[in-house]
Structures are given as structure tokens and as C-alpha cells.
Amino acid sequence: MNAISLPGVTPNRGRRSNARLRLGIPARLILISGNCACLINDISACGARISLSELPRRSSSAILRFLQYEVFCEVKWARSGHCGLLFADRLSAERLTELRGIADSYTEYDRAAQARRTHDWVMGRTRVL
């Protein structure tokens, strides 16, 4: 299998078979027991490493929700405020490239997304609960 070369992606090292993209993007980890805010430290086609205050149990099924994405995953390990997730379906190279662009300008992306949500609320398209 040939590695995908993306700008800002850490090359394969050690036992990892997929390049890791450093993100630093906020997300939510949704579990059967509840959900919590987290930060995506890095992501690859097959999984992610996140930081969070309450560690989930190993082998828990979850949904990682970030930006406009929802990814089904399994918690593979959890320790020291971090956990590793294995995605049910691989992320495409196009999606990883898109994430790299968003991560590079996340402040602007977040500001534009907030403006869209506010506009939709003012126009009566969404409700704030």
C-alpha cells in the first residue's frame, strides 16, 4: 500500500500504518453513557487521538462529531487524558486534505460557521434549545 503524501501530515513512524494529520480541532465524543467535549490532536484515515477530561472505557463504541462530520468509531485505548479511536470506515484522502485546510484557518472557519448559525436562527430556520 502506498502512503498518501499530504502537506502537514506526519510521515509514518513506528507501528503506525497511516500518516497522522495534526489538527487541534474541538469535537464531541458521543457514547452510550453520555457525551463529552474533546480535542482532536491528530487524525489519520483509520483513526484519531483525542484529549478529553473523562476517559471512556476501552472497546466502547462511539461517534466522533466534529465540524460537519460524524464518524463511527471504537475506543482502542485510553490513558493520561488521551484516547485512541479506530474508525469504522476509512477517511478518504480528499477528506483529509479538506481537514488540513480547515485546521490551517480554523479561527476563520469557526467564525464563518457561527455567522451561518446566527443567520439561520434570525431567519427562523433553526431553534435554539
Image (tube, grey):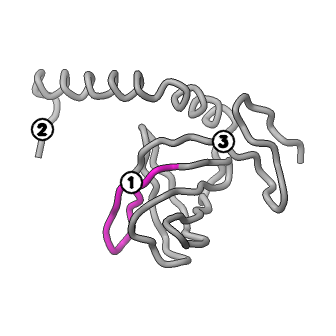
Magenta stretch?
28-40
Q: Which residue is drawn at 58% across and 57% down?
A: 49
Q: Main secondary structure of the magenta part?
A: strand
Query: Which disc, if any, is residue 28?
Result: 1
Element on which disc 3 rests = strand
Question: In the picture provided, is 6 more to the left or to the right than 39?
Answer: right
Element on which disc 1 rests = strand
- Give the residue pinned by disc 2: 127
Relative to the observer, which residue lies in front, 23 or 76? 23
- Give the residue pinned by disc 3: 21
Give the crowd class for mark 3: few <14, some 14-19, many >=20 residues within 10 Å: many
Q: Where is residue 47 in the image (x, y as percent from the top left)?
A: 63, 55
Front: mark 2 or 1: 1
Question: In the picture provided, is 68 more to the left or to the right than 83?
Answer: left
Q: Which amino acid does label 3 sit on?
A: Leu
In terms of sequence position, does the residue under pointer 2 or pointer 1 come before the other? 1
Q: Where is residue 68 in the image (x, y as percent from the top left)?
A: 42, 38
Give the crowd class for mark 1: few <14, some 14-19, many >=20 residues within 10 Å: many
CA–CA distance between discs 2 and 3? 35 Å
User: Mark 2–mark 3 contact, CB under 8 Å?
Assistant: no
Q: Which amino acid does label 1 sit on?
A: Arg
Relative to the observer, which residue lies in front, 72 or 56? 56
Does 30 appear above or below 66? below
User: Is residue 79 found inside the magenta-colored segment of the image?
Assistant: no
Q: Which residue is drawn at 49% across and 75% down?
A: 60
Question: In the picture provided, is 128 more to the left or to the right than 46?
Answer: left
Q: Position of residue 86 (x, y in %)?
A: 62, 62
